Image (spheres, rainbow, N blue to C red):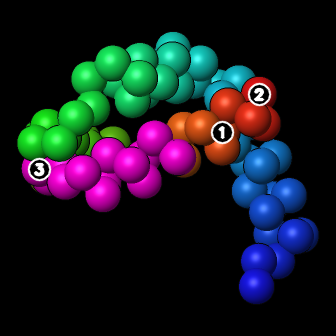
């Protein structure tokens, strides 16, 4: 069962992240709404403060797309 206190804490953390990075979240929303289909390859590169880069990617299945869209829908309900 979900812990309501943890969900509330996560919501507050999400809102703080959204305040700090509004353009990034709008970008992710656009991708979710317009570019995500089965077979889409999501590629992520992260560079740490020391300049070290890590890269990963995943080819999305229909189930992945459905999951990510549901997450987006749930977040929209909170906005």
Residue 59 has which mark? 3
Dot 2, crowdedness within 10 Å: few (<14), some or many (≥20)?
Answer: few
Magenta residue check for 60: yes
Q: Quadrant of residue 42?
A: top left
Residue 79 has which mark? 2
Q: Give the mark, 2 or 3, whose residue is nearer the N terminus.
A: 3
Give left or right: position of 29 versus 60: right
- Image spot of residue 5 (x, y percent): 89, 69
Residue 24 visible in rendering: no
- Image spot of residue 1 (x, y percent): 76, 85
| Residue at position x 67%, y 31% in the image | 76
Mark pair 2, 1: CA separation:
7 Å
Q: Give the mark, 3 or 1, whose residue is nearer the N terminus.
A: 3
- Nearer to us in this view, 1 or 56: 1
Mark pair 3, 1: CA separation:
23 Å
- Image spot of residue 74 (x, y percent): 66, 43
Q: Quadrant of residue 47?
A: top left
- Which secondary structure, mark 2? loop
Residue linked to disc 1: 75
35 in relation to 59, above or below: above
Quadrant of the snapshot with the C terminus: top right
Assign the magenta stretch its main secondary structure: helix
Magenta residue check for 67: yes
19 in relation to 42, above or below: above
- Which secondary structure, mark 3? strand
60 in relation to 2, above or below: above
- Magenta segment range? 58-70
């Amino acid at each position: 069962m979900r812990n309501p206190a943890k969900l509330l804490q996560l919501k507050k953390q999400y809102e703080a992240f959204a305040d700090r990075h509004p353009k990034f979240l709008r970008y992710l929303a656009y991708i979710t709404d317009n570019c995500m289909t089965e077979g889409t390859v999501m590629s992520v590169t992260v560079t740490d403060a020391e300049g070290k880069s890590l890269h990963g990617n995943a080819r999305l299945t229909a189930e992945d797309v459905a999951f990510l869209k549901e997450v987006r829908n749930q977040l929209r309900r909170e906005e």
